[in-house]
Image: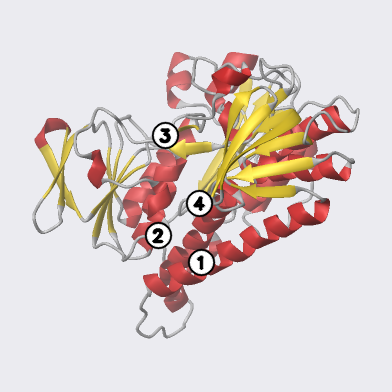
Amino acid sequence: MAKYDYDLFVIGAGSGGVRAARLAAMAGARVAVAEEDQVGGTCVIRGCVPKKFMVYASDFATQFEMAKGYGWTVGETTFDWCDFRDKKDAEIARLSGIYVSNLVKAGCDLVHGRAVFLDAHTLEVTTREGKKKITADKVLIATGGRPKLPDDVPGTEFAITSEEAFHLPELPTRMLIVGGGYIAVEFACIFHGLGVEVTLAYRGSNLLRGFDEDVRSHLAEELHNSGIKVVLACQHERIEKREDGILISHVTDSMVIESEVVMFATGREPHVKGLGLEKAGVKLNDKGAVAVDEFSKTSADNIWAVGDVTDRVNLTPVAIREAQAFAQTVFQNKSTTFGYDAIPTAVFSQPPVGSVGLTEAQARREYGKIDVYMTRFRPMKTLFAGSATRVLMKLIVDQATDKVVGCHIVGDEGPEVVQVAAIAVKAGLTKAQWDATCALHPSVSEELVTLREKFTPPELAAAE
């Protein structure tokens, strides 16, 4: 008789949890996965995938206008939000079903319910049928993160988060989005493209904190030119709801913003509440995330955690790679860790941002002397159609080694280009090797291998 019901019990069937469960099961382990919501996690159900469908839908307005510049006669266009929303939800349900099927095919038991720790090896799972106890030799926490509303702003009960934004009963005429990170920026562009009058309010001095400064300023200018109203250095004081349903947001300097919907995208937090971690001896770090070592192991000897619940790098591909390293280490006898350097990331704004490696400021702190190559230009496609939008491309090079340590692009297909550029940055290729690569003409990306003139920021030029 086995000492425990399972060799591995996974809490959370998102990208990280599913990958770890499948690999462990294929290695011969007895595996169960508990999920209290739809299988697929944040990325598939309420994040990357449905958001990208919304990005595609919202971009057609721009494409219709651009088509006119190429000689097309474009008739009356309308957008049916409810039709799109329902088709999107049907596709998400289909993808969720694939995740379920993959788990079952790998030999995993799927438990639809909420799991909490009773001790390090025992969990209580609440399902529709009731509660049951399950024991496991090893446990993986993969519960992800959840959006949070500020607790110091009266009236936030009238607001929504990004999760509710996917399922609005109808499109509003006016929408206020609060936040300056990638989620806020992406949804501002999405709803603007769908015809909503959008105001983006952020308490900071510029959008996309943590990204390269030139990327931030360039995108802010593009958003302004597109018609999105961006209000910076703006702090919410309270939200009121009128009898007609209109929301009144009172913000800094007695400014009042009226809208039908207020969406907060001011941060996410690890989903650890109510899991009973203290009963299992699992400690949290000072950010409220599950504390782990380089092998994703927690303070409990038999418990690991991967993905957003650890608040390391909150990206789906990272959670998958962490899960893969966990499974290889624990169930395949291959001691494996994941390296967090040169992780490519994207902001699916309009225009989108692709970035990999260090920002200019980070590179100056780490390497001291660096070379910067940067260009801004109007690409062929939009230039011909009469659009004023511009592309930004920027390479950052360590002077001592000539290695390209950062690549940043703002412009159509920027994320697609950066995914390939990330291979070069991760491999440590030099600027000379980039320059030796033949350009593909005509393309936007050819600029990456034809940048020759070094860029010196005005403030540094003045100092010199």
Q: CA distance from mark 2 to mark 4?
A: 10 Å
Residue 281 location, x and y as percent? 62, 16
Amino acid carrying mark 1 in the image = Lys
Q: Earlier in the sequence, mark 2 or mark 1?
A: 1
The one of 268 and 6 positioned closer to us in this rendering: 6
Q: CA distance from mark 3 to mark 4?
A: 15 Å
Q: CA distance from mark 2 to mark 1?
A: 10 Å
Q: CA distance from mark 1 to mark 4?
A: 11 Å
The residue sitting at 62% across, 55% down in the picture is 444
Determine which residue is flagged by label 4: 46
Q: Which mark is residue 167?
A: 2
The one of 438 and 250 positioned closer to us in this rendering: 250
Q: Earlier in the sequence, mark 3 or mark 4?
A: 4
- Colour pattern: secondary structure
Residue 161 location, x and y as percent? 37, 45
Q: Which mark is residue 181?
A: none
Residue 64 location, x and y as percent? 43, 74
Amino acid carrying mark 2 in the image = His
Amino acid carrying mark 3 in the image = Gly
Q: How many marks?
A: 4
Determine which residue is flagged by label 1: 88
Determine which residue is flagged by label 3: 267
